[in-house]
Image (tube, rainbow, N blue to C red):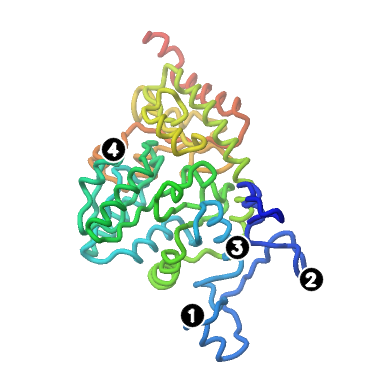
Amino acid sequence: MTNDNNKTLGFATNAIHEAYDNQEGKIRSLNPPIYMTSTFAFNSAEQGAAMFQGEEQGHFYSRISNPTLDILEKRLAKLENAEAGLAFGSGMGAITSICWTFLKAGDEILCDKTLYGCTFAFFAHGLSKFGITITHIDMTDAQNVKQAISEKTKLVYLESPANPNMRLCDIEAISSIAHDVSNVVKGDIKVIVDNTYCTPYIQRPLELGADMVVHSATKYLGGHGDIIAGMAAGNADDMMRVRIEGLKDMTGAVLSPMDAMLMMRGIKTLEIRMQRHCENAMKVAKYLEQHPAIDKIMYPGLESFPQRDLAKKQMSLFGGMIAFEVKGGIEAGRKLMNALRLITRAVSLGDAETLIEHPASMTHATYTPEERLEHGISEGLVRMSVGLETPDDIIADIEQAFDAIYVGKLAAAE
């Protein structure tokens, strides 16, 4: 979206205005209309035939497209600096629709060692049943991608930061390697990045060379814990293929118009929410880093974070997610979680409320213990999504929880 002087507008302005003009028409509603309809009428039989054959643009069935979703998809595409966006009924709907579109038996997905639990399960226990090879490598070293790519490789898939242990991958380097090798082997390797943790406000993988970006829009994009949704963005041809093949025919993972409206409501405040999430997370991370009960903390904004230079290179801020391990292992972590009063014990992330969970027994329980060990997810890891509360109140709750379970113990140990 541009203003009258053809000046490119800022992120927040596009998040509020892109793809909807309330200055036109007789009914100038501030918010886009919600088209709660399953189907659309044709002016004539000839028009209907033309739409089905792609000779005329328009909406005819909401499993394929809907005017409310159309605004949301264009808005997300603008924020990700993509040609096109696509909405789904969940983040897994986005991932599965893309995979069913671009993969067939005999193909390979090359993916990082650490993935969200349901993504891992879909790859390892789902796609593998249909003759698709899943190869996990350590993508924190981009050269491992070059060594592992084969003529069977069709997708390179990664998260950065990774859920739940905050590992980073160099998106630009991996994308460059994958595309260079793709040209050599005359393949068409597509790089897909899960950008859920960062959102396009903090990181835009397409600008770093990735082909497609996916989101669990349930999280920061929605921001209020009241919807389940997914989003994807990429070039127009790829997104149209996913719309017609993966979404329409293979998964049917359609987002409802009502949820699309809630998503647009959330995106309007994305910039200011992400700023506060990041500010709060930095304060909480610094508090945890110096606490004697903490054995290890992973947050890209800390000087002690081993990949901080990469974080500064490809992220504009350091995000709202923290991973840490408490001295005493898994039982100590559980005691800490149970002693919290303000912070909510719940899976998911990106809500206004601060959420805490134990990945090994919750979000990443789809891994076996052996798989978690192999993929860098320790049994004692705790994941925290730092919310929008007053940061001193978040820290005070953690402190009272530590006091409740460690009273006298740490002093005696020292």
**Residue in the image at 55% along x and 65% along y:** 256
> Amino acid under label 2?
Lys
Q: Which residue is mark 1?
A: 54
Amino acid carrying mark 4 in the image: Asp
**Residue at image location 60% in from the left, 47% down from the top:** 11
The mark nearer the N terminus, 3 or 1, is 1
| Helix, strand or loop status at disc 1 | loop
Q: Is residue 47 above or below residue 255?
A: below
Q: Amino acid at mark 3?
A: Ile
Spatial CA distance of label 4 from label 1 is: 44 Å
Q: CA distance from mark 2 to mark 4?
A: 57 Å
Mark 4 or mark 3, which is nearer to you?
4
Give the number of the mark in front: 1 or 2: 1
- In space, the residues marked 3 and 1 are separated at their CA atoms by 20 Å
Query: Which circle's residue, 3 or 2, is located before the other in the chain?
Result: 2
Q: Which residue is mark 2?
A: 26
Q: What is the secondary structure assignment of the residue under circle 4?
A: loop
Look at mark 3 in the image and give the residue it sits on.
71
Please give the residue where the numbered disc 4 appears in the rendered image.
141
